Image (tube, grey):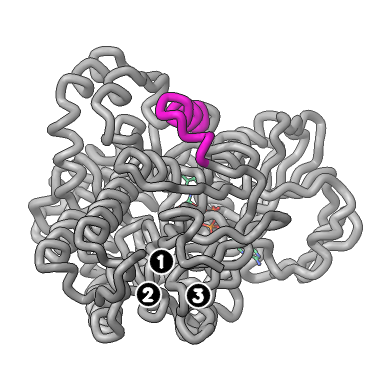
Amino acid sequence: MSRVPDYDAVVIGAGFAGLYAVQKLTSLGFHVAGFERGEDVGGVWYWNRYPGARCDCESYYYSYGFSQDLQQDWTWSRRYAEQPEILNYLGHVADRFDLRRHFRFGAAVETLVFDEADEIWRVRAQGGPTVTARFVISAMGCLSAVNWPDIPGIRSFQGRLLHTADWPHDRVNFSGRRVGVIGTGASAVQAIPHIAREAAHLKVFQRTANWVLPAWNRASDPDFDAWVKAHYSEIRERCATSPGAVPFDAPTQSALETPEVDRQAIYQKYWDLGGMRFFTAFTDMFSNLEANATAQAFVRQQILKIVNDPETARALIPTTHPIGVKRPPLDDDYYETFNRPNVNLVDIRNAPIIEVVGQTVRTADADYEFDDLVVATGFDAITGALLALDVRGRGGVTLQSRWREGPSTYLGLGVAGFPNLFTITGPLSPAVLANMPTAVEQHVDWIADCLDHMRREGIGVIETTEAAEADWVSHANEIVGQTLYPHAESWYFGTNIPGKPRRFGVYLGGFGAYSDRCDGIAQAGYEGFRFTSAPN
Ligand code: N01
């Protein structure tokens, strides 16, 4: 085998991250092959087609900023775009920058093996030949490996079985059907009101009540759109420098130091604004249990006001975790849906689902028969997609064995022992706690600069040092310990997957500060990385 690889880089995934990675690298003259398991572009927006699927970030910033023309030309129809529109947008980006020709679709990568002698990656996708590349860039996303719950018999359900994260492409009609939904996370909260409007009867199986905030989705306002387009540079700059990669004003006052009457007014103001802005009300919401309890009390009152049946309202009020530290869903009529006569909540915390037999979901208390079972149990998040592949670094060491105790990376970008492998929005980067397109662009730009630097300097291999990785992991863990996040079991910790090691997978130091740090590291000659070898 020749040392000259087939490609400079292989990019895995054609969602927000993969599309931009291919656009950026090819524009710099790199020879790139993209692999995508779906039949078209879109990533998470390709698979998650359940009714009500939409983004919980407003579209004017949940969008690419890399092209002035693109952001001026594209107009969103809703405040929070729905899945079909986001998928259209990504299709438009693929067409506009002629990106599809670089991708192989229906090509799920299965093995990634680093060949130490030739210093290249050997990449094989299902049913395809092995290709070689100097670099591999994972753009598989944090929420792409589907989590089927370990409920005995569930995959053999004899009615129509659906998973929110792998939804059929044709419209699913629930009219006249008896439907069960398992799960009350962000996907279920979006889907439930839509299913309830169609179904004859809907039962929602809830293991953990979630703090749900209003989205207040609505048609776009042309005046606001015009203002956005005139101020896009400012908006993108605010995203780039803010803790959550969003253009929100940072909080300035403590909940505990604000008098009760003013505090209520402030919570009401943010509730009325809608969305994740609620969490910018006060400085201490994520660091102080007492402060967080004031926000919980406010939302509890809203639930009690909306839900008519007191018993159902009480069951919908979370008791297991502070607000915000388990990803809060945003709703359009979620709580109101439980006032419908055709909807019931089933508590499976106290009476768990034991098995599924035929068309019956059997809990410790009762049997429920359905025509359709909607499984909304989320993802093996953050590490699931990478660990589903056979990834082998130096010495044939597998990523599975390296991450046996949980994910370990430097900046969420590189893993010691896995040279020339980059992970866009990888574990221990701000990723899912930042606005994803902004986080994606920051990572892609950083990686592209690094590859360009290596090309100019004639360097063949970059590798994270073990010391830098160990320091990053302990720094990331230390920050988590200063917050309330450890007070919830969540997919951030991996605890939604039985047997997965409990380690917080996201960097909480703030997106803006993180991005500055990445830049500083690059300017200091890629501190914490080791360069070796010259390419041929
Ligand atoms: O998944 P989840 P999701 N038996 O893991 C329950 C993003 N997202 O698909 O909490 C019974 O949050 C589980 O119960 P519990 C967003 O970041 C974004 O809803 O583990 N129940 C929970 O209720 C989100 O956070 C958008 O006790 C079981 C639910 O299933 C992430 O995706 C839209 C179970 C899973 O909730 C994941 O959301 C939608 C079992 N064995 C989603 N296993 C946007 O806006 C799990 N559950 C972009």
Which numbered mark, 3 or 1, is in the foreground of this view? 3
Q: Is residue 47 visible?
A: yes
Structural crowding at the residue carrying mark 1, measured as other residues with C-alpha within 10 Å and reported as few (<14), some (14–19) or many (≥20)? many
Type of amino acid under label 1: Leu
Type of amino acid under label 2: Val
Q: Are marks 1 and 2 in contact (CB under 8 Å)?
A: yes
Q: Where on the image, by quarter, is ligand 1?
A: bottom right
Residue drawn where x is 56% and y is 53% of the image: 184
State left or right for residue 422 relative to residue 92.
left
Residue 477 sits in which quadrant?
bottom left
Which numbered mark, 3 or 2, is in the foreground of this view? 3
- Could you tell me which quadrant the C terminus lies in? bottom left
Q: Which residues are magenta?
A: 86-102
Secondary structure character of the magenta stretch overall: helix
Q: Nearer the viewer, residue 308 or 369?
A: 369
Type of amino acid under label 3: Asp
- Which residue is identified by label 2? 415
Cα separation between marks 3 and 1? 12 Å
Is 96 contained in the magenta span?
A: yes
Q: Earlier in the sequence, mark 3 or mark 1?
A: 3
Q: What SS does tag 1 mark?
A: strand
Name above or below for residue 497 compared with residue 455: below
Q: Which mark is residue 421?
A: 1
Residue 47 sits in which quadrant?
top right
Residue drawn where x is 68% and y is 36% of the image: 341
Is 318 contained in the magenta span?
A: no
Q: Which mark is residue 6?
A: none
Q: Position of residue 258 (x, y in %)?
A: 10, 55
Residue reaching furthest to the top = 222
Q: Earlier in the sequence, mark 3 or mark 2?
A: 3
